[in-house]
Image (cartoon, rainbow, N blue to C red):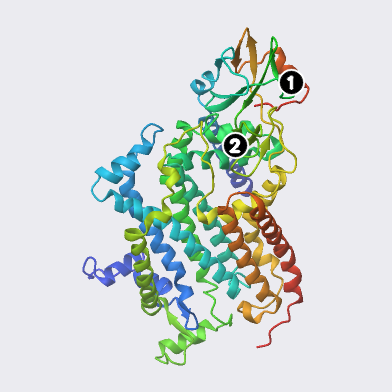
Amino acid sequence: MSTRRNFMGMALGGFTALGAVGGLYAAKRTWEPLPSVKAAGFTTIDLSEAKAGELVTEKWRGKPIFVLKKTDDMPYHDRDVVIGSDRYLITVGLCTHLGCIPAYNSSDKMFNCACHGGKFDVSGINLPGLPPSFPLDIPPFRIEGTKLVLGEKGTEYNKMLADKLTRKV
Amino acid sequence: MAKFDEKAKPFSKQWLDDRLAITTVMKVLNIEYWIPKNINFLWAMGMILAATFGMLVISGIFLLMYYVPTVEGAFDSVNYTIMTEVGYGWLWRHIHGVGASLVFLIIYIHLFTGIYYGSYKRGREMIWLSGMLLFVLFSAEAFSGYMLPWGQMSYWAGMVITNLFAGGSLEATGFVEWIRGDYVPAQAFLGRFFMLHVLLLPLVIIGGIGFHFATLRLPHVNNQDGEEIDFEASAKLWKEGKKKESQVIPFHPVFLSKDVFIMGIYFILFFYLVFYNFEFAMDPVNFDPADGLKTPAHIYPEWYFLWSYEILRPFPTDLGLIAFGIAQVIFLALPFLDRSPNVAPASRRGLFKFWFWALLLDVLVLTFMGKLPPQGIWNTIGFIAAVMFFVLWVALPFITKLEKKIEE
């Protein structure tokens, strides 16, 4: 009697658990970004018209992208995107602390975040002792002449990633 | 079939009793649910919260009829359609905004009342835990609702708060994108938070309120002196007509009539704010439509989240997240961190008296600092207050262990 009841209990419990796992998996998949959202994740930007020392903001995956052609007095950094003799700062324009957009101040050549007081230099490096613990993220890019395809990983980007100069975005 | 009176007229008292036991239900939940006499107006906050939640549900129903949950339509449906076209649409919106703010004010009063009088221990632990669960649910409800007008503050609060789930150095950006359903807050994000705000969370909150009431029924509410009342003996006196000698009153109609009086005063304040001073609940920055390429100069949450926001702000990412996480759950542990056997007002509890006022003051300082821009002296004060918050909680088991037992 009790073994029969145990069997029924375990059979019911087993099928219920199976259904619950299936339901949770379906819920998890429903909550994921749609294929159309993922497919739209590539943007091409033209760097040839950028003026040295002037910040341009582009848009990629809904996020602001900072493009700053460096002037000669701005220090070189391995994070720079180099095309010919021109050096560019290309980063996602969101503070690595919690994602506000830092404002560029051309007089002290700093990106200042109003939310929690983070600061980044013209190479996107975070100043120590402030909330952000990482430099501004470099988006995946591939160089095509004077153009950049954002969202695709080129050799230069993969090298930066391997050298731990930026995080995966 | 249980025995029932064949001759009872349909829907008469006897007829309903045979089918629904309404007399028993009324006794258990109302006329023989005993409340101590020795209480003050602070004991009315529970019913005031229930009434405010009711106001939020009613105003929400009317807002829902014209609100459009799309990134193109949301902002105009709130700020143009509801505010200028819909007859009395402004009324529902102002009730909803003011109600959301006041519900937190009363929650905080309710919560600190419980701490002051020790109403969370010796049989009342589940009341405290279910109450804190409701606080978390109301926080989620407030946050999801704040997304819906799709203004600048909606967007950037959504951005910042969902980024918390990346867990700092854990770099769980995939998880953040899963929560948003996109790389940034967009249509998928607005749609799911709309669902949470108008359906799932209200359902869970209603269940939570029912549970909170249920946790009260057996241990009964505390009183101003933390006195252990013999409810059965006192109830007997009341029923015998010795109302003066009895230490208790029935929930209905005696306690409720006092409750309703205080509720009346509260609603004068409520509607004064709704009609004449609603601006405090309407952040001007959120009257700019959401723009993913422009952060407002200064981002801050609504006032009721400022204290926990200020605990996050002065630390580096990881430490800040850990501090923030602990601050969110530490209040749950209160019944277990308080090691003293006394159930008494804080004023009679030695060091705990100072602990209580220090905690209240610290939360107030954190709240004010959270609103000020992160610079100079404000940073220092905010940092000290954040550290103080943790010092207080770590000290609690020790100072309550030292506390002498109050002799009756």
Residue A38 percent coordinates (x, y)? 54, 22
Residue B149 shows in the view: no
Residue name at image x 49 percent, y 54 percent: B138
The mark nearer the N terminus, 1 or 2, is: 2
Q: Is residue B16 left or right of residue A122?
A: left
Q: Is residue B171 left or right of residue B223?
A: right
Q: Which residue is mark 1?
A: A160
Give the Cα separation between the discs numbered 1 and 2.
22 Å
Kindly indicate whether the residues beneath marks 1 and 2 are on one polypeptide chain: yes
A60 vs B315: above or below: above
Q: Nearer the viewer, residue A93 or A13?
A: A93
Tell me the quarter of the image containing the C terminus of chain A: top right
Residue B188 percent coordinates (x, y)? 47, 32
B206 vs A27: above or below: below
Q: Secondary structure at mark 2?
A: loop
Q: Is residue B152 left or right of residue B387?
A: left
Residue B259 lies in what quarter of the image? bottom left
Residue name at image x 57 percent, y 32 percent: B177
Label count reads 2
Q: Secondary structure at mark 1?
A: helix
Residue B127 percent coordinates (x, y)? 55, 66
Q: Which residue is mark 2?
A: A99
The chain to which mark 2 is attached is A
Q: Amino acid at mark 1?
A: Met
